[in-house]
Image (cartoon, rainbow, N blue to C red):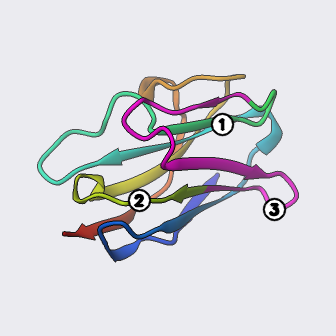
Amino acid sequence: VQLVESGGGLVQAGGSLRLSCAASGFTFNDFTIGWFRQAPGKERERNGISCISNVDGRKYYPDSVKGRFTISSDKTKNTVYLEINQLKPEDTAVYYCAAANRPFTIAVRDYDYWGQGTQVTVSS
């Protein structure tokens, strides 16, 4: 099983990024894919900041990112994308994608496989 994130970087506040998560080694269509983040000096957030079910298409965004984050899944490429707009300095974190063998879940404890993370740094 492998999850490989890419697309992070240094961006000015107000800018945009698109993160990618390429998955392999499991039945992609049976899993929920979530993005989680860990800010400097803090624990990884307990719920995803964007999650998508490859089973039924359900999506989740917490209020803190609604309207700015968009998650999508390309089943032809086994890849999930996270479009982030209007970036804020408080979005600075390592962003991880993860896969849960469940129809839908947002809880970090439910995720079975994890990528190595990609750094997003937002300057003010």
Give the residues drawn in magenta, as a range. 58-81
Percent position of residue 21, x then y: 60, 59
- Locate residue 97 relative to residue 72 in the image: left or right: left
Structural distance between the alpha carbons of marks 2 and 3: 27 Å
Q: Which mark is residue 86?
A: 2
> Label 1 sits on what residue type?
Ile
Amino acid type at image mark 2: Gln
Residue 104 lies within the magenta run:
no
The residue under label 1 is 52
Local SS, label 1:
strand
Q: Nearer the viewer's eye, disc 1 or disc 3?
A: 1
Q: CA distance from mark 1 to mark 3?
A: 15 Å
Q: Who is closer to the viewer here, 94 or 88?
A: 88
Query: On the image, numbered disc 3 is attached to which residue?
Result: 77
State the SS at label 3. Answer: loop
Between circles 1 and 2, the one closer to the viewer is 2
Q: Residue at x 75, y 45 (%)?
A: 26
Residue 53 appearing in the image: yes
Q: Residue at x 55, y 66 (%)?
A: 18
Q: Residue furthest left?
A: 41
- Please identify the quarter of the rendering in which residue 12 is found: bottom left
Residue type at mark 3 is: Lys
The percent coordinates of residue 93 (x first, y second) are: 28, 56
Residue 9 bears which disc, if any?
Answer: none
